[in-house]
Image (tube, grey):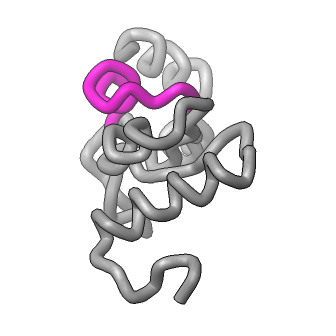
Amino acid sequence: KLIGYNKSVKNLVSHQAKLATKAGLDALVCSPYEVNAVRKFFKKEIITPGISFNKQKNDQKRTANPQEAFHKYKSDWLVIGRSLTKGNIKKNLQNLISQI
């Protein structure tokens, strides 16, 4: 109950961000869609997984492309897996750079 499992997703995210601030954490990992809510309470670094260059979601439900994550959602760090490592890595890196 203390960590918020009795709340809606929006309220849970805000609650967890407050707990992270209170605990003195240096960074949080969250979906690109929660970055703005987290930033209201957590002023340190935010790491965003689920970054994809294309519309393929694979096993991730809440994805964003690199440009959205940095510019729209204001993430500090991105976690990019399959979009980078599957296929031609050099080409994928070039694609990443062009999207940022």
* Residue 90 drawn above or below residue 31: above
> Residue 48, position in %: x, y?
51, 42
* Residue 94 drawn above or below residue 35: above
> In screen coordinates, is 7 left or right of 4?
left
Verify whether residue 71 appears in magenta: yes
* Nearer to us in this view, 48 or 88: 48
* Residue 57 drawn above or below residue 34: below
Residue 84 visible to the viewer: yes
Verify whether residue 18 appears in magenta: no
Residue 88 visible to the viewer: no
- Give the number of marks: 0
**Residue 2 sits in quarter:** bottom right
**Residue 7 sits in quarter:** bottom left
* Nearer to us in this view, 21 or 71: 21
Q: Residue at x 25, y 47 (%)?
A: 55
Quadrant of the frame with the C terminus: top left
* Nearer to us in this view, 96 or 32: 32
Magenta range is 64-77
> Residue 78, position in %: x, y?
54, 34
> Residue 38, position in %: x, y?
42, 45
> Residue 47, position in %: x, y?
57, 39
> In screen coordinates, is 44 left or right of 55?
right
Q: Residue at x 61, y 31 (%)?
A: 44
